[in-house]
Structure formats: C-alpha cells, structure tokens
Amino acid sequence: MIKRIMEETVKRACGSFPAVVVTGPRQSGKTTLLRMGWGRSHRYVLLENPDQRNRALADPLAFLRDNPPPVILDEIQYAPQLLSYIKSAIDADRKPGDWLMTGSQNFALMEGVSQSLAGRAAVLTLLPLSVEELKGGEGVRADMGEKLSKLGEHQSSHPGKQPLETADWLLRGGYPELRANRNADRDLWCAGYLQTYLERDVRQALNVGDLNTFERFLRLVAARTGQIVNYSDLARDAGISQPSARRWMSVLEAAGQVFLLPPYHVNFGKRLIKAAKIYWLDTAMASFLMGLHTRGPLMQGPFAGALFETAVVSEWVKAFLNRGLPPSLYFWRTRDGIEVDLLIDYDGKLHPIEIKSTSTINPHHAGGLTKWRALSQSTDVDGIVLADVTETFAVSPGIRAAPWWR
C-alpha cells in the first residue's frame, strides 16, 4: 500500500476541526486514505449505496442517530441535506476529528460545505498519486520549505533511483488503480473513466445534452495542456459559445481534472501575458484524450514537451494540496518572449523553475531563468531547470539542473 502524504495532513486537521472533508476526482484514493487511517476508530458509511442514501434522505436525524460519530461518511454529495444536521450535531458537541467525509463532485459539494460547515470543517483536496509518493520513504518531505530547499541540492554521488520511467508516467499517470495494478489495461481504464465520470457526472453538472460536443471539448482542452488559454479559439473549435467554454472549463477545474496556472503580474518594466495557462492534472487522461497510446508516438510526437511540462506542474500542485496548502504557483511571460515556466511562491520567496523534456541541458535552456534573475534581482534563490536527467548539476551561475521527479 502506497502511503499518502495527505494522511499526515488529515491527522493535523483532525486535531483542530470537528469535521474533515476530503474532496477530489473519483478514483484518486479518498476512501482508501480514510479507511486505512481511521477505519478502526470510525464507523464507515457509503452514501453511494442506495439503501444508505435513501435512509439519509428520508430521515436525516434518524440516520445520524443510527450512525453516530466518530464516523466516515463516504460520498457525502449523495446526501447533501445531512450537512445541516451535522452542523447542529457539531455545535452541540464540538469534538475534533469526529466527522470524516469524502466527496467526488467538488462543484456540488462545496456549496453545501461552505453554507453549513463554515469554520467547522477542514477541506482538503486529494489528487491522484504523485511521483513523490511513489518514492515512498526516499526523499518525501512533509515540510514544503525543506522540500524546496533540497530541490537543487547537489546529489551526484547519491542521485537516488528514478521511481519510474518518464514515458510510463506520461502514459499511465497517477490514478491508484493504474499504479497498483500493472496488469490493468490503461486504454480500457481511461475509456471507462471518461464514460463513467467525465461524461456522466461532469456533463450532468453542466447540463450538457450533446455528448459528442462535450467529448470534443475535452479533447481540445487536453490538446492545449501547457498552453495559454484562449477561450475564443477554444469555443470556436468546440462549436460552443465563449461563455459556455468558460463555464465548462471552470467545472473541469472544480472537478479536479484541470489546473489553471495564473500569470505573475510584477512586470519589471515589461509588458506581460495576463491569461492563464491550462494544465491537465493527470497525464494518463491527457495523453489518452490526445489519442496517444504507446511510448514511441508519445515521446517522439509533437505533444511530448507539453505533456512533460504538464507532469511537472501537476506534481507541484499535488505537493501543495497534499500538505493542505493552496497552490501558490505562477508562470511569468513577457510579450517579447521572455518566460519562466513556473514560479513557486512560498514563505516570502519566489523559486523560479524552467521545465525541459530533454536529457541534455546547457546554458541556453536557462535563458529565461537568467533574465528573470537579472530583472527581478532575485539572487538569493537559485533557478532550477527540471529535466529528464538523472542527477543535479550546475548549468550556469545561480542555476542548476535537477531530475524532474525530485
């Protein structure tokens, strides 16, 4: 069983809040996380079960009386009416860690949580497995500051073993079923996930009648991973209105499928790009939607660089969320082409990162970092080129290359 970093975050939350709500996309491991960590101390109730759901909807008070805390309520979005009654129960007996809940449909769940459990619940988002978690005890750092400080540390004598092949990660991604069961057919799994979750749950939340149009939209978004979002072009290519494109994208974001990376606005005298960049949060689904199924066409094709960048950005999104922190991530690009792929804002410092899919790094690849350091006068933090390399080494003054999976 792969240990999840969020387990420690849930433990901390249970010490402070009466309720902890773990959200995220389906199949990301929410139920396993809570049952493995709290299955012995908490009663478990699956609200997706029709019998349990019907009891909860018909008589919430009786249902909660029959299932008192400490309790795990799995898939709470199937009985959102319970949240108001849970609020009353918490107000009557505010005991930390009594109520653990999961919910897959973040967009439907959060309205009820914000209305009923404000100030009473910690809300955490669990995404699929990270490479950091696959490394297990080797190099996993609970503290974000320590993780960042070690990123460019020289380790050529003890570089550590790469936990997985880059192409394998881009094709199979981090969903636990595809990671835990190497015999699982990736194409069949992704096709089933597309049909049962994206085309059912997400499409129903959007009230989209035309399934073909929605699937075309998903494939267009996947093909744009790592690019600046242009809603006008996206709407035109999908055959929908621009407001619909924005609304559909916002629901994909709330559902834990995509991440919109905002631009960093300090311009240092330069005109900046002000639109966000779009990243799919799991490379298995992104590459599947692109029609990529095997190593050769993926690594030698036109999407290799974008998928590699997507993998790295999603790792840092997971790093923040797994620790209960909002992702303080940005990119910086001027209109004359100066760019830094990723800026990590933590504890008053900006950590600039360039992402390169190549295994051969030279000073040319650090051009954006060099210009950033000069314009921002940020000489106290090294620039890092995360690439498909096996060890950390100096590229130019103040800039180091490091393995992307570190």
Image: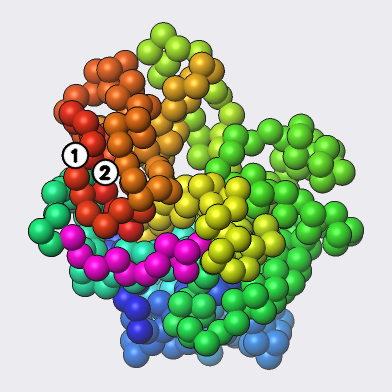
In the displayed structure, would residue 24 be above or below residue 375?
A: below
- Looking at marks 2 and 1 on the same chain, the residue that comes earlier in the sequence is marked by 1
From the viewer's perspective, is 175 left or right of 80? Answer: left
Res 76 → quadrant: bottom right
**Of the numbered discs in the image, which one, if any, rests on residue 394?**
1
x, y percent for residue 270: 45, 12
Magenta stretch: residue 168 in it? yes
Callouts 2 and 1 close, C-beta under 8 Å: yes
Magenta range is 159-170
Which residue is labeled 2 in the image? 401
Q: How is the model colour-coded?
A: rainbow
Question: Which residue: 51% across, 16% down?
Answer: 336
Q: Answer with left or right where residue 73 lies relative to residue 107.
A: left
| Horizontal side of residue 266 vs 183, given as left or right | left
The image quadrant of residue 276 is top right
Three-letter amino acid code at disc 2? Answer: Ala
Tell me if residue 324 can be seen. no
The CA distance from mark 2 to mark 1 is: 6 Å
Quadrant (top left/top right/bottom left/bottom right) for the N terminus: bottom left
Q: Residues within 10 Å of mark 2 (few under 14, many from 20)?
A: many
Image: 226 above or below 108: above
Q: Dot 1 surroundings within 10 Å: few (below 14), some, or many (20 or more)?
A: some
